Amino acid sequence: MSLITVKNLSVAYGANTVLRDVSLVVEPGEIVTIVGPNGSGKSSLLRAIIGATEPASGEIFLKPGLKIGYVPQRLHVDPTLPITVERFMRLTDRVSKADCRSALAAAAVPDLLKRQMSRLSGGQFQRVMLARALINRPDVLLLDEATQGLDQPGSAAFYQQIETVRRDTGCAVLMVSHELHVVMSASDRVICLNGHVCCEGAPAVVASAPEYRALFGTGTGGALALYRHDHGHDHNHDHPQSHEVDD
């Protein structure tokens, strides 16, 4: 049974319709990435799935008992607030210290439990957010531009950790990303969104689709070249420049 099924979803804010007739499914264990230009409705789609945004029309079906872990695009923590990573992770859920340690280990930051949130680097902060999303062992992980503000090595390391989490836990991943090189190397399926689903499929299929190239330009062949290199289809070791799109 599919974990998430979205059928003919439309989302509007007042007179502004940001999503129209969007349909998609997320199957167990797969990594699905949503790409699209600024204002294309990517974050609105995730918010609708978690119930934070009311659809104008359409339906969202979640597998009964589905557990979702969510990493939002931004979270501001007052730097003057004295709060440790452990306390932050236990703010809304009754979880043990052992659960916190296990989740931090899964996010590859096992030594941050007693660190002040205000003292974390950007990369450490995002790993703590990931750990908090993992603490209840979700069936599917939703990531909304989780690497925003990180440099390229930091982003690459974060997404490698997502693949490790998927391998170790079997959870599915639905993520929004503007980093096309990451999409091509880390995803099982890509959904190109621009208010509606322009195209979807395996990374190689989407990268060659006219609708995708119309949005991101013909230069995105470089992202596909990196995908081929990472998957052993191409022995060219020159890493092409990634093409990034602001959300």
Image (cartoon, rainbow, N blue to C red):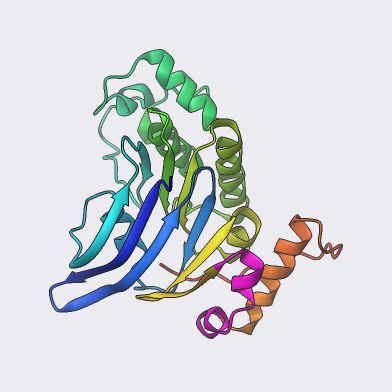
* Closer to us: 132 or 7: 7
Residue numbers of the magenta segment: 201-216
What residue do we see at 56% from left, 51% from top?
Answer: 155
Vertical side of 247 occupied by 133: above or below: above
Query: Does 235 sit left or right of 47 as displayed?
Result: right
* Closer to us: 61 or 114: 61
Query: Does 18 sit left or right of 235 as displayed?
Result: left
What residue do we see at 29% from left, 62% from top?
Answer: 44
Q: Percent from the top left, x then y, of residue 131?
A: 44, 32
Residue that protrudes farthest toward the left in the picture: 14
For the image, the number of numbered tags is 0
Which quarter of the rendered picture does the C terminus lie within?
bottom left
Query: Does 168 sit left or right of 225 as displayed?
Result: left
- Magenta-highlighted stretch: main secondary structure? helix
Which quarter of the rendered picture does the N terminus lie within?
top left
Q: Percent from the top left, x then y, of residue 149?
A: 46, 55
Q: Please check the rendered image and state whether residue 215 is part of the magenta-colored stretch, yes or no.
A: yes
Vertical side of 117 occupied by 193: above or below: below
What residue do we see at 37% from left, 75% from top?
Answer: 196
Q: Percent from the top left, x then y, of residue 76?
A: 29, 46
Q: Percent from the top left, x then y, of residue 86?
A: 36, 22
What residue do we see at 41% from left, 46% from top?
Answer: 3
* Closer to us: 198 or 221: 198
Q: Is residue 113 visible?
A: yes
Q: Is residue 241 visible?
A: no
Q: Please check the rendered image and state whether residue 244 is part of the magenta-colored stretch, yes or no.
A: no
* Closer to us: 118 or 205: 205
Vertical side of 173 occupied by 231: above or below: below
Residue that protrudes farthest toward the front in the picture: 1
